[in-house]
Amino acid sequence: MTARLLSYPLILVLTGLSCLAMLIPGLHALVIEDHSVAQAFFYSSILGLVLVITIAVAMSGRKRPENSDLENLASLFLAYTVLPLFLALPFYEGLETTSYLNAYVEMVSSLTTTGATLFDRPERLVDSLHLWRGLVGWLGGLLIWVSASAVLASMYLGGFEVTVSSEPGQSDLRAARFERASSARRLAQVTKELAPIYLGLTGALWVMLLISGDTPMTAAVHAMSTMSTSGISSVGGVDQATSGFAGEAVIFLFMLFALSRLTFSTDTMNTSRASLLRDPEFRIGIALVIGVPLLLFSRHWLAAFEVDEVESFSDAINALWGGMFTVLSFLSTTGFESASWATARDWSGLGTPGLVLLGLAILGGGVATTAGGVKLLRVYALYLNGQREMERLIHPSSVGRVSSFSRRIRKRGAFIAWIFFMLFALSLAVVTMIMAALGQDLESALVLTIAALATAGPLTQAAADTPIALIEMSPAAKLVFSTAMVVGRMETLAIIALFNPGLWRD
């Protein structure tokens, strides 16, 4: 089966796009006269283009059936595991002071939009390499955005299994033949519709950050990492940027896109519910963004306000903003920390609020967005089911008065959501034990596992008592961490569907 997968046109397209993308940091390195880095990108781009053209010419005379959704899902898996081998080549050659394994893990982290970096000191990488990390993360965000709408939605995976009655990983039997025949056309159509929106939003955010005071490089990397929710930064985070509060406010608005697919599109809706204000994912996300900071800081704000009105009020506003920004950032699995987050921690009395950040990252963002985690729609399904069960405890013979949408979610959807939670918990336990066996202490192993499975890499620096030095992990631990990032990005249900032999039988 592997030989068949390597011949899929989708892999060639992704590799070709990666080759073209390498020209951007290559040109940047050429402009700043960093010729060794420029050569690394140009030579890697030429090598990749020659390989892609050669394979395309060799396959041009063959006639094969159009790829099915399952084959496109397999191509997506290969993109996250095999493509980083090529993406790491210019990074390895340009840096020259690291191993190829480190470069590979860095590219897996970027492509899966996890954003965990082995190089915690930004000055170790030149701007061209930072630009490449941000660009790979941005392309990874576009890849999962398009794949969610074109592949996962039709297979009822990635959170869509909650709202339908069909089995996860399988299309509706009545439309299976149509879906199989139109898979490539649907993929191209979705890309044509979403790519301009994704590019336009990134460009708009870049311009706003420039106006706010960021340098062009910092603004570009932060704009790409915000839209892709990768959390990649060329200066160590938005708290180190020169745009200050204005830059954080702009990024805050754009991170809202990760809470619900309805913030930018309605093409993946399974029902007629197209109102953003009625969308349960968006409402839960906003409730968390407002409620968590208020719960953490309200008691301390009232106590301090009685002592010094002016100073306490100013500190409280900073603490509240720092809490809201950071909560939204980790809920969307972006992982940026506000410059006021230190004030928020002091105000709340929490020395290391890592548990709060870990919980937010596990919840994650919306379905068919670039955010990771278990998805807010699954949380909503379990909430509806729990609410109904409590009603039945009080009134055993009652009949629920809800719409067909809510009725479907709280029954079939809640069952599938619970299965996913159990699979996520099982993956969490297994990977944590493996990481602990490979030399990590229990706290570090747990933080690393959640960071990988929730695709929230900055947790490794923010959630533990001391930042975790990823570069000091053993080679085996780095490979396990990379595998967990791929599993977290594709989700366990998709992995199970991919490796189910029964689904490959025509």
Image: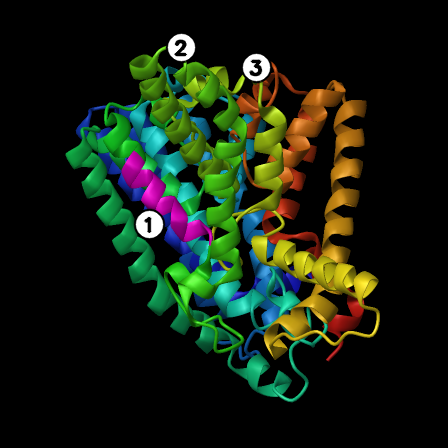
Amino acid type of the residue tagged 1 in the rendering: Leu
Mark 2: secondary structure: loop
Viewer-side label of 1, 3:
3
Among the 4 quarters of the image, the one containing residue 428: top right
Q: Which mark is residue 20?
A: 1
Q: Which mark is residue 307?
A: 2
Are the two marked residues, 2 and 3, in contact with CB atoms closer than 8 angstroms?
no
Residue 452 appears at what percent x and percent y?
62, 37
Q: 364 or 191: which is nearer to us?
A: 364
- Left or right placement of residue 245 versus residue 413 in this view: left
Q: 179 or 306: which is nearer to us?
A: 306
- State yes or no: residue 141 in magenta: no
What secondary structure predominates along the stretch shown in magenta? helix
Q: Earlier in the sequence, mark 2 or mark 1?
A: 1
Q: Residues within 10 Å of mark 1 (few under 14, many from 20)?
A: some
Amino acid type of the residue tagged 2 in the rendering: Val
- State yes or no: residue 254 in magenta: yes
In three-dimensional space, the C-alpha distance between marks 1 and 3, rounded to whole angstroms, equals 46 Å
Q: Residue at 67% across / 56% down in the picture?
A: 383
Residue 139 appears at what percent x and percent y?
41, 49
Q: Which mark is residue 351?
A: 3
Residue 291 appears at what percent x and percent y?
51, 40
Mark 1: secondary structure: helix
| Residue closest to the far left | 211
Are the two marked residues, 2 and 1, in contact with CB atoms closer than 8 angstroms?
no
The reply to whether residue 334 is in sight is no
Q: Is residue 239 above or below residue 281?
A: above
Image: magenta residue range: 249-259
